[in-house]
Image: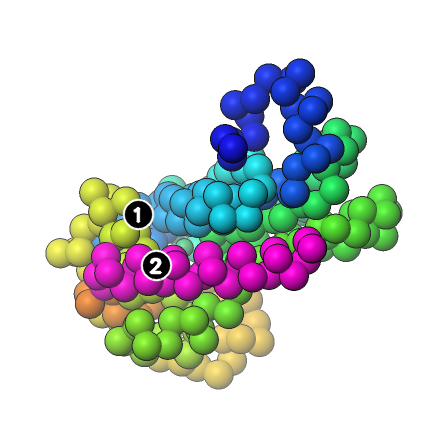
Amino acid sequence: MNIMYDEYSWPEMKELLPKVRGVIVPLGSVEEHGYHLPLCVDNALGFEMSKRLAEKTGCLLLPIFPFGQVWSTRNFPGAISLSEETIVSVLVEVALSLKRHGVKNVIFHSGHLGNAPAMKKAARVLYDNYDFKNVFYFAYPDYVKLSQGVMEAPMWKGNGMHAAEFETSMMLAVRPELVHLERAVIEYPEDTCTMDFRCMPWEEYTATGAPGDPTISTKEKGEELIRRLVGRMTELIDQFIK
Ligand SMILES: [Zn+2]
């Protein structure tokens, strides 16, 4: 089965959509990822994992929605910053379009962690206001646990994966030509306990925009991380959609 949603004609969709297992709505962002990675990391990773997930689960895949909620990094050059409300509106309207065509299950999947609150909010709006209950959402589910035994460097603050060994390794697996490992820098900013309890744009505490150690990233680690994440998401979809 061709997984690409928008490569079908409307007469084909008329047949296919009411029968399809689900539709994956991939999300990403355009934001800084340190000195050594491009702005497109979350789009590249989000789309590649969504593709593998669609192939494994028999779902269709929409084109990626490429802009995210990037409040924390919005002042780094190049960032495209949407409000949470805008993303919620987009997701609700995409899901309602799918519902109109008979799609029974919708999966929001983000390659950018910052979109998680908007995905959850959109699913609640669909549940409460439109009686659309089969809307699922995830962004790197269980990634800290799944990365154990693969990652060598500690994650900043225990879960920081942005542009560090985790994302850099996955980019080496997916788009190696865009990775400039020779520019990567180790940076573990001081973890002031107050930063979790107030607004603090990233430029106030990280010079690189990549807290952690990206220097020891490898393609092999990236392939293994993607394999585990896609495996976990496949399990979740199999539990959602019997
Ligand atoms: Zn990212």
Most frequent secondary structure within the magenta stretch: helix
Residue 218 lies in the magenta stretch: yes
Residue 45 horizontal/vertical position (percent): 40, 49
Q: Quadrant of residue 102?
A: top right
**Mark 2 or mark 1: which is in front?**
1
Please give the name of the residue rendered at 45% of the width and 75% of the height, measured from the top-left corner.
145
Residue 214: give its label. Answer: none
Question: In which of the image's four quarters is ligand 1 placed?
Answer: bottom left
Q: Quadrant of the C terminus?
A: bottom right
Amino acid found under the numbered disc labelled 2: Glu
**What is the CA distance from the residue labelled 2 to the residue labelled 1?**
10 Å
Residue type at mark 1? Answer: Val
Q: In the displayed structure, does residue 169 sit left or right of residue 136?
A: left
Tell me, yes or no, if residue 46 can be seen here: no
Write the start and end of the magenta stretch as one range.
217-242
- How many numbered marks are there? 2
**Residue 82 location, quadrant:** top right
Q: Is residue 102 above or below residue 164?
A: above
Residue at x-position 46% and y-position 57%: 230
Is the CB of mark 2 within 8 Å of ligand 1? Answer: yes
Of residues 42 and 102, which is closer to you in this image? Answer: 102
Q: Nearer the viewer, residue 126 or 194?
A: 126
Report x, y in % for residue 187: 26, 71
C-beta proximity under 8 Å, tags 2 and 1:
no
Q: Please, is residue 68 above or below residue 181 in the view? A: above
Residue 158 in the image, given as x and y percentages of width and height: 42, 79
Please tell me which residue is depicted at 48% across the width and 83% down the height of the picture: 193
- Residue at image position (65%, 43%) is 22
Q: Which residue is identified by label 2? A: 167
Q: Residues within 10 Å of mark 2 (few under 14, many from 20)?
A: many
Do we see residue 24 in this rendering?
yes
